[in-house]
Image (spheres, rainbow, N blue to C red):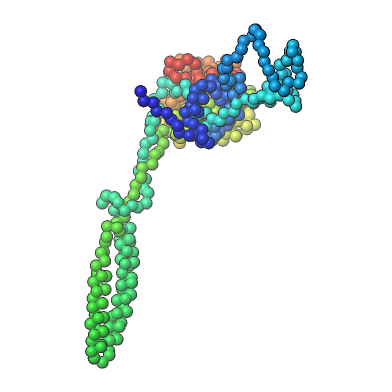
Amino acid sequence: MQQIIDRRLSGKNKSIGNRERFLRRYKEQIKGAVRRAIDGRGIRDLERGEDIRIPKKDISEPVFHHGQGGQRDMVHPGNQEYVTGDRIARPKGGGGGGGSGKGQASDSGEGEDDFVFSLSKEEFMQVFFEDLALPHLIRTQLAETPEWKSHRAGFTNDGTPNNLHVVRSMRGALGRRIALGTDKRRELHQLEAHLETLLAQPADAERDQALVVTRERIAQLRSRIEAIPFLDPIDLRFRSRVKVPVPTSKAVMFCLMDVSGSMDESRKELSKRFFILLYLFLTRHYEKIDIVYIRHHTQAQEVDEHGFFHSTETGGTVVSSALVLMEEIIRARYPSDQWNIYGAQASDGDNWHHDSGRCREILQNKILPLCRYYAYVQVAEPEQNLWDEYTRLSETSGPHFAMRKVTSADQIYPVFRELFKKEGAAA
C-alpha cells in the first residue's frame, strides 16, 4: 500500500502536516479561543490572523507514573535539606512555578506559560465558520472557480492575423530598415561623392582603375541595401490578450440599526458583534463584499462604520424610514440580478405603533423579493409591536426571513449559528 507524506514546510522550517495534525487534535480549544478573539475586532478587520492562547493543561501529554502505595527507595543527589522520614510539601502559588503569570513573585520555582498558537487569516475563518452555510439560498453567479475575462496586455511577436497591429508592425519594419541600412547608405554617399571627384580628374590608367573599384563597391552596396526586406516576420506585432480572474460573485450587506434613545451603548455593542459575524461569514462565500450602514431614529441616513456605531445623534423611532432608504439604495446602486443582497437589522423592538405595520408591508412587498436573506435581531427582551408584526411576516415569508432575540453577548454566536446553520445540522 502506497502512502504519500506531505513534507512541505509552512514557514520557519515548520511542517504543514504537523500543523494540520495540531489543528485537528486541539480543535475544540482553538474554536473556543477563536470565538473569544472576535470580541475585539472591527467589521472589516480581516487583514490578519489571530494569536490564540491554549492553557497548558489542554496540551499536556499523557505519561506513565507510579501509583500511590508501596515502598520505594529513591536517591536525590545533592540533597542537603532532608533526612529519612521528612515529608516534602508541594510547591505553592507563583513560587511553585504554576506558569501563566499567576501567583506572587518568588526567587525559586519554575513552570510553563500557556501555549500561544498563531492562526492565519484563512485558518481563523475556517475554524470560525466550518459548520455554517447559507440556508435554502441559490446564490446567483456563485462558483468555486473564478471566471476569466480577456484583457489587453500590450503586444507580442506571435498571434493570429486578425490580431495583427499594422501600425506597430510598419513602425518596427521602418526602424529595422533604418538600423540595418544606415552604415551602408553613409558609405554609399561617400563613394558616390568620391566617384564624382574621380570623373572630374584627367583620364589615366590609375584613375580608370579607381573608377572600376569604386563602381563595383557602389553596385555592391546598392544590392545590399535593396536586399533589406521591406517587411520581415520579426517586424510583426500582434495585439496580446491575457485572461485574468474576475469575481464570480459579489454581495452587498445592509446593516440597519436603531439609534433612538432606548438603544444604549451595550445594545449597540451587541448589534456590532452580530454584524461582524455576518460580514465574516459572507466573505467565505463572496469575493467582493460591499457594506452599507444605515442608522435611523425618526429619520434614516447612510453613514460610515464609525458614525454607525459611535454617533451620538438620537431621537424617536420610525423604523420604516430605514427600510425605505434601503430600497432606494438597492434600486440605485445594487440591481438584484447582479448583486446578492443581504439585510441585517438590529433594534430593541421599540417603534412608533402606527409604523410597525408599514414596516411589515415594505419588507414583504419591496425588500424581501430583492434579498437573498434578511435577518432581524432584537437586542432586548420585551416583545413590542414591531416584534409582533415581524412574527406575522416570518410565518408567510418562507426561508428568506429570520428573526431572533439577543440579550447578552454570550447569546450572539449561538443565535448567529441558528440563523445560518447548515440544513440538517444541529444549532
Q: Is residue 165 left or right of residue 310?
A: left
Q: Is residue 87 left or right of residue 290?
A: right
Image coordinates of residue 392 in percent, x first then y, are 48, 15
Seen from the viewer's position, the closer of residues 328 and 138 is: 138
At 25% from the left and 88% from the top, the residue drawn is: 206
At 35% from the left and 23% from the top, the residue drawn is: 1
Furthest residue to the bottom? 202
Q: Quadrant of residue 166?
A: bottom left
Q: Is residue 384 visible?
A: no
Against 329, is 134 above or below? above
Q: How many marks?
A: 0
Furthest residue to the top? 69
At 45% from the left and 32% from the top, the residue drawn is: 7
Q: Is residue 2 visible?
A: yes
At 73% from the left and 25% from the top, the residue drawn is: 108
Seen from the viewer's position, the closer of residues 147 and 402 is: 147
Image coordinates of residue 401 in percent, x first then y, are 46, 20
Image coordinates of residue 376 in percent, x first then y, are 52, 22
Image coordinates of residue 132 in percent, x first then y, are 47, 22
Q: Is residue 406 left or right of residue 209?
A: right
Seen from the viewer's position, the closer of residues 324 and 72 is: 72
Against 36, is 195 above or below? below
Q: Quadrant of residue 188?
A: bottom left
